Image (cartoon, coloured by chain):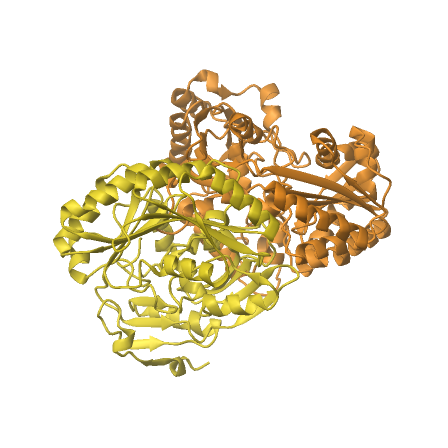
Amino acid sequence: MDQRLVDKFTRAVGAEAVLTDPVQLVTYECDALPHLRSLPELVLLPRSAADVQAIVRVCDSEGVPFVARGHGTGLSGGALPVPGGVVISLAKLNRVLEVDIPNQRVIVEPGVTNLEITKQVAPFGYYYAPDPSSQQVCSLGGNVAENSGGAHCLKYGFTVHHILAVEAVLPNGDLVEIGSPLADSPGPDVLGLLVGSEGTLAVVTKAVVRILRKPQSVQTLLAAFDTISEAGEAVSRIISAGIVPAAVEMMDAVAIEAAEAAVHPNFPPADTILIVELDGPSSEVAELFGIVESTCRQSGATRVEVAQDEAQRARIWKGRKAAFAAMGRISPNYYVQDGVVPRTKLPEVLGRIRQLGEREGLRIGNVFHAGDGNLHPLICYDERIEGQSALAERVAGEILIYCVEAGGSITGEHGVGADKKEFMPKMFSEESLEAMQAVRDAIDPKRLCNPGKVLPTPRLCGEVPGPYREHPVERSGLGERF
Amino acid sequence: MNVSQALRQGTAQDAVDGLVPPVVALPESPEELAKILAAASLDRQQTVLRGGATKLEWGRLADRVDLVIGTEKLDRLIAHRYSDMTATVQAGMPLAALNRQLAEHGQYLPVESAFAGATIGGIIATNDAGPMRHRFGTPRDSLIGVTLAMTDGRLVKAGGTVVKNVAGYDLGKLVSGSHGTLAAVVDATFKLLPIPLGSTTLVATYADGKALAHDAAVIHASQVELTSFDISVSARGGRWILLMRMASSAAAMDAQTAEARRLLSSAPTRASGDDEHVIWDEQVRAPWSEGGTVVRFSWLPAKLPAVASLIEGLRAHGCRVETFTGRIMGAGLLRLDGEEPALAAAVGELRRSTSVGHVVLLRGTRRLKELVDAWGPPTGANEVARVLKRKFDPQGILNAGRGPI
């Protein structure tokens, strides 16, 4: 990067907040989606909202693209650096500013980890509900950007349901408060737009989150099934009985094998295991849990294990939450996909995924939030075998098509990021994508705020809508379409 | 498509703030609605979008209304995917009609309205919610997908039909609370809930707001799980009433009732069945059942004792507090009576108070709305909302001057 610009950023935030050493920059070249990498030219480590504002103002005046980054646990390349741009790491804005138990809210900076919020309020009998598997390390700012979910969002909703207000720096450098700690802030729900916008509309510098009272009772069971359709049937019957479980998770044989190899949760041998958790008042949980247990047996469960204590419950969840990382034990490489189907389409789509794996000769494990139809196929491959990386990527893309064909979504919680933007037209019409682009252009007219994420690459300049025609730029080999 | 079939002359029944629109459009398809909007934009026709016309008086006064677009002919339930617990419904369908149809499969949308004719489109545009927001949030929290008609004539979708989905910008949230200033809602998809096994309500009565606030804080901090948790005061009754609704199985409700009784300082009565239904129906309708000024405001839950004093003090301005109904989580409605200057002073007092915020004059006489701004000072998000408005509605035709932006 031009030294004049480096100097300008250094004047804005101080030399200690500016990283230029290539060895240090490598840390920021990707998020948790490592196949997309780009070495940033400059990383900035602001310590305050004023620092963030100063950085964004320089970016705005100099036309420098910027990418905000939390703790880099994103799975869609949402924090992938942009050529010629800077990365704004919010890791040092990591203070819990206020714990307000009577009003059941906590004010944090974006670099605070998700689990830290619960740790702060647990002594008072409260918790922060959204619980992505990476909750020990992921940042609240990243959760806001991605509208993170987790295993318990079936009953409690996503990040967007738990954020009351944010302070954010807009792409023009203005510091604004969006939303309100009080209910019924008049006007369009700009906060609802911002949460889940994947860092493309603003940089959040503070958030007011809602905390919940810990439920009186939590009960968890694990049921083993010989087929995925029996497990799916059990889920349908539980939900149609009027029960809204706190969590319903499924793992298939491949995922079970991996989890066993990694963290030894002592899962029973099965084709599919189902984890169901109920929480709420003790009397309610006790009554409904009996229904869940008998429903699992009636649906063909070969074994039902009810967690007798917190340790056993923790063991079950450890097996489930470790499943992604555990794939490394059974495969040299794996690709984590994230798609959604209507819950009733789970057996059909899982069948198609199984066939796809067999056809392409790749093992595909499945770990998913069965209650809301959110699939996480884990595609195993070996990058040392020529062509397998590309094959795995193609298979992962094919799975997204199945999801869209079933009436679902290309992402339930990992976000579109850089990874899936080219799949957006499979889900949304050109008009809809243009409206989303209009939102972005209204707030970020210079297109500096995390460019190249979420929305597909705009059509090449001069191209007219209609059926495919080769653009002169393509013909000349100067550009290509994704 | 012959759009002119969808147009008719406005009548006194179509008046907005006393202004009769020359033209009323009642499109029969989403495409027709979009086409009418585009034509209106091209001609800079000041346009008001109308659902059931139940909340049309909310907001600032209109200077001019050239066109009202009603959604009453877009009133179908497009799909109830009951096994997936989602439904897609056209904007003009009344909430009550929707919930009647959903009940056929034992499901419902957990949103209440004080107004019998309130439509889905109007509920989204105002994000108006009832007591169940305590547990389930406002309409935006159940909304998972939306189709919008834009002023350039395009139909745009955001979200989808699955309960979990983070692809693209959530334009459904954006139009929630927009009061028809950005685009017309054509249809909406919601996640649904199973109708609970049973429901019961505890009613505790107090001599003053402070005593009620004490018990409310105790229950709020307990593990008693309520679907609705409300406060109600009327000039006629004079007593402060705490309403606690729980929905679960019979045994669970008994256990929860016992727990609540143990915690409350005032012994509650318990209502179920029709009695319970009447209690909540009256609670939702109380602010609107008679004429008068209606003011909405919010507060942090722990500020309730200060809010109670503030309300009691409004009398000093020479106005009468007819009803105060609210949610313990910090949202309420006041129905006031009195002369306009006194009412204006009361609104001013609320706006100056540090105990409450977002004081909005929803219903008031023309004179009162001339004296006080209906929406109050702009929020931090207004700057962003206004740039979006310029993009979505470049001619500024949608609810111009009346809405919050």
> Chain B's shade in the image?
yellow
Q: Is residue A159 above or below residue B74?
A: above
Residue furthest top as drawn: A16
x then y, percent, for residue A125: 53, 30
Residue B395, visible in the rendered structure? yes
Residue shown at the point (45%, 64%) measured from the top left = B120
Give the color of chain A as drawn.
Answer: orange
Q: Quadrant of residue B69?
A: bottom left
Q: Position of residue A254 (x, y in %)?
A: 82, 41
Q: Front-most of A290 and A77?
A: A290
The answer to whether any part of residue A445 appears in the image is no
From the viewer's perspective, is residue B217 above or below residue B27? above
Which quadrant would residue B304 be assigned to in this image? top left
The residue that appears at 32% across and 71% down in the rendered structure is: B68
- The answer to whether residue A97 is above or below residue B326 is above
Residue A168 image position (x, y, % from top left) = 41, 36
